Image: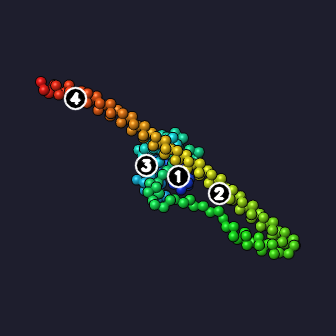
Amino acid sequence: MLYVFLVDTGAMLTFEMELAMESVETLMTSITSTFMIPMEKQVLIMQGGETLDPSHRICNYSSAGTEQNPIFLFSKTTIESPMPPSPSLNLGSETSLKEEVERSLQLPPTYETLVSRAKLAMRFQDMGSELLQSCVTLINEQHLQRQGWLAVVANLENIASTFETRGSILEQTYTEFLEIIPQYKSLLDR
């Protein structure tokens, strides 16, 4: 499977592994058709901050797209929206169990009551296991969201560093140009 983590909502998206041999643009098209995120609103980043080039093949990015190192997807639509994204989360219904416990407390002390309460206890255990699994999933998603945002920060730092380097080169070239202007003027005056 090819893993893409939607950082905005904390959802792991999976695609067939054959897609890893295709271009990043093909992946973006698949994301558009499956998850309705327009291509122009998608930002795909690897851990470390490198953005994926739509013209390159996905397999050219070493170890990107694995479950431990997914491709991070940011939706500009979600970022530009005035409403924050909300994860879909189902923690079960405690009210029905509460009502069953209250009814169970009213039962007479018989073998059937014992069996009924044992089944109720098993349902509590199942619900607890589901809640535990939900918590583990949330922790994993929070970890991946943190990695995604760290990738964005790394990307911004790379952009700022590149801009700073280009700015200093421009400044040096401009300073050299200003120093040589008198020589050009003297040549023109002759």
**81 over 70 or under it: above or below:** below
Alpha-carbon neighbours of circle 1 within 10 Å: few (<14), some, or many (≥20)?
many
Q: Which residue is mark 2?
A: 134
**Identity, as a three-letter code, of the amino acid under mark 1:** Val
Which corner quadrant holds the C terminus? Answer: top left
Residue underneath mark 3:
25
The mark nearer the N terminus, 3 or 4, is 3
Residue that badge 4 annotates: 181
- Kindly tell me whether residue 115 is visible in this rendering: yes
Q: Which marked residue is nearer to the observer: mark 1 or mark 3?
A: 1
Closer-to-camera residue (119/56): 119
For the residues labelled 3 and 4, the Cα–Cα distance comes to 48 Å
- The answer to which of marks 4 and 2 sits earlier in the sequence is 2
Instruction: Please report contact status of discs 3 and 2: CB closer than 8 Å, yes or no.
Output: no
Label 4 secondary element = helix
In front of the other: label 3 or label 2? 2
Earlier-in-chain disc, 3 versus 2: 3
Asked if the residues shown at circle 4 and circle 2 are in contact, with their CB atoms under 8 angstroms apart, the answer is no
- The secondary element bearing badge 1 is classed as loop
Q: CA distance from mark 3 to mark 2?
A: 33 Å
Query: Would you call the spot at circle 4 few (<14 residues within 10 Å), some (14-19), or many (20 or more)?
Result: few
Viewer-proximal residue among 118 and 176: 176
Residue 111: image x %, image y %? 87, 71
Q: Residue at x 46, y 60 (%)?
A: 82
Do labels 2 and 1 touch, CB within 8 Å?
Answer: no
Q: Earlier in the sequence, mark 1 or mark 3?
A: 1
Q: Secondary structure at mark 3?
A: helix
Q: What residue lies at 72% left-to-right and 60% top-to-bottom?
A: 128
User: Which residue is label 1 attached to?
Assistant: 7
Q: CA distance from mark 1 to mark 3?
A: 19 Å
Colour scheme employed for the rendering of this structure = rainbow
